[in-house]
Amino acid sequence: MSTTERSGDIRTRLDAVIHGESSMRVPELVKAVLIDSMQHGALDLPASLTTPRPDSYARRLLHRDPSGLYTMVVMTWGPGQKTALHDHAGIWCVECVVDGRMEITQYDLLSEDGGTFRFSEQKRVSAARGSAGCLIPPFEYHTLANASAANTSITLHVYGGEMDHCHVFEPAGDGSYRRVTRALSYHG
Ligand SMILES: [Fe+2]
């Protein structure tokens, strides 16, 4: 089966779930589609979408639903590359490890006071190839990191819309964080 047919098949299944189900169930159903798709043949992405970048992880658009209900984004993580603590601007997301291994750390927001945010670290998960997880607001704070110091990892993200910005939380030095709005775009 060709790359186009494989990713096209996933899109057909995602279209059915995202356009056909009540919104409450969608993230878990998307997660099931991604896990099942990975179990029945790897998502064989073209090299143009999976080439690492030296300066940071790469974020590239795989598919944008014409009616705007979802986007599929491929991220490529060189050894040691990771995100800052961030949110998803209120958009649900399902993230699947396509290759390699990722470390995902979830945070709970404890308080917000005058622009000062405090979090507690919750679960830290080592996610292998083929595993997937949901991020559903208001539980949307996390960091992602390539768990390998030697190899590239690749993840596929399905967003419930187009995430054109998020908020990054920068350490203030006393255990608290300041929130910074970050515009998001796609690498070529
Ligand atoms: Fe994220």
Image: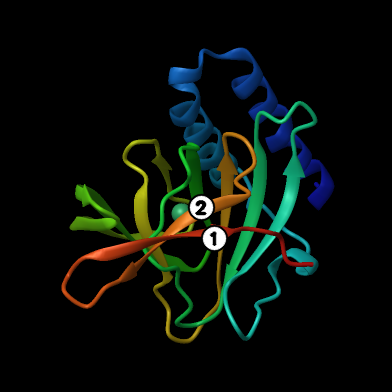
Horizontal arrangement in the rendering, residue 16 relative to residue 127 (left or right): right
Relative vertical location of residue 62 with respect to residue 152 in this rendering, above or below: above
Vertical arrangement, residue 173 with respect to residue 167, above or below: below
- Please indicate whether residue 85 sits to the left or right of residue 49 in the image: left
Q: Nearer the viewer, residue 168 or 65?
A: 168
* Residue at point 25%, 53% (across, down): 114
Name the residue that disc number 2 marks: 166
Q: Residue at x 33, y 36 (%)?
A: 138
**Which amino acid type is marked by label 2?**
Cys
Residue 91: x %, y % from top left: 50, 37
Disc 2 C-beta below 8 A from ligand 1: yes
Q: Dividing the picture into quarters, in which one does residue 103 lie?
A: bottom left
Label 1 vs label 2: CA separation?
Answer: 5 Å
Residue 57 is situated, as x and y percent measured from the top left of the image, at 57, 73
Task: Residue at 48% x, 86% y: name it.
Answer: 150
Query: Is 185 above or below relative to 135?
Result: below
The spot of residue 51 in percent (x, y) is: 71, 74
Secondary structure state at the residue bearing disc 1: strand
Which numbered disc covers residue 182? 1
Of residues 40 and 103, which is closer to you in this image?
103
| Residue density around tag 1, few if under 14, some if 14–19, many if 20 or more, within 10 Å | few
Above or below 41: residue 179:
below
Assign the C terminus to one quadrant of the image.
bottom right
Residue 140, image x and y in percent?
A: 37, 45
Residue at 71% x, 31% y: name it.
68
Side of 184 relative to 89 (left or right): right
The residue carrying pointer 2 sits among few (fewer than 14), some (14 to 19) or many (20 or more) residues within 10 Å by Cα, namely: some
The first of marks 1 and 2 along the sequence is 2
Camera-nearest residue between 18 and 138: 138
**Amino acid on which the number 1 mark rests in the picture:** Arg
Whether label 1 touches label 2, CB < 8 Å: yes
